[in-house]
Image (spheres, rainbow, N blue to C red):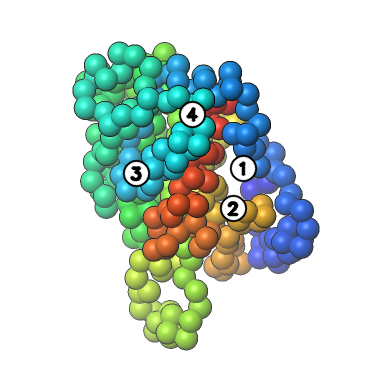
Amino acid sequence: MNFLFKTGLAVLLIFTVQGCGKPVKQENRIIYKSLKDMSGKTLMKLSQKKIFFGHQSVGNNIIDGIRDIIKDNPEINIKLIEYKKDTDLDNPVFAHTEIGHNNDPLSKINAFREYMEKGAGSKTDIALFKFCFVDIDKDSDVSALFEKYKSTMEILKEKYPGTTFIHATIPLIRQNKNTIGSIIKKALGKSQGLFDNEHNIKRNIYNQYILDKYKGREPVFDIAEIESVHPDGTREFFFEQSRVFYSLFPGYTDDGGHLNKIGRRHVAEQFLLLLLNL
């Protein structure tokens, strides 16, 4: 069920019910699955693929989470490397690299396309990149950004039909808590900085573009959903003009944006499950 554009009262009732009882399992959600449910033979599949992952700082958190999981599950046996050249993909490997520049999402789209066209696209089984939360703020033109992303991915899918491209939602930050200071700032029309909820609103809108276009049709690494789901299955959210928007669950972060040890492992596990389910 998509709650993004439901009325505030209806959403409040839904989340009240979820918070009081067992988590409500939603269609197509993989958040409740665990690597422990997979057989050793299934887990071995990950070590037989050529995977390319472009990212920045939150991506490094996710890579650290994958390392944590591999350490505890040696049967996964993924060869995790930092991508340097196209020959790194001559054999099965999980290759990752930082791409583009933070605060410049177009640079990340262009860098990903460049990596694909310089050799990675013809060698990978699976490829994706992700934006960071700093790439979208309250002033971003998310419609134009999505159109650029979509057109670039269409070009790459046509050029490299043997590669499965995964689409990623943009990570979120924790919501701004209504302290006296923040309430005064909001009343005066002043920015509340990094944790201004308006930034997360724009990220939610961009993510909805991704979900509307690709979910159920092509693979989606829904980082925003994974980050916003509490351990009990409910979601971290806030209201704005009778609409509900999602934010990062505070238990997954120490600084409000990047993932701590609990958060990185949680997101990494869901990432690996997505790869296994392709």
Within 10 angstroms of label 3, few (less than 14), some, or many (20 or more) residues? some
Q: Nearer the viewer, residue 7 or 219?
A: 219
Q: Which residue is drawn at 32% across and 48% down?
A: 57
Q: Which amino acid does label 2 sit on?
A: Val
Mark 1 secondary-structure assignment:
loop
Q: Earlier in the sequence, mark 2 or mark 4?
A: 4
Q: Which of marks 2 and 4 is in front?
A: 4
- Marks 2 and 3 sit apart, C-alpha to C-alpha, by 20 Å
Give the image location of residue 34, x and y in percent: 62, 37
Left or right, residue 227 beside residue 22: left
Q: Earlier in the sequence, mark 2 or mark 3?
A: 3
Q: Nearer the viewer, mark 4 or mark 3?
A: 4
Residue at which label 2 appears: 229
Instruction: Tell me the number on the disc at residue 60.
Output: 3
Q: Which amino acid does label 4 sit on?
A: Pro
Residue at which label 1 appears: 31
Image quarter hosting the C terminus? top right
Residue at which label 4 appears: 74
- Marks 4 and 3 sit apart, C-alpha to C-alpha, by 21 Å
Q: Which residue is drawn at 59% across and 22% down?
A: 40
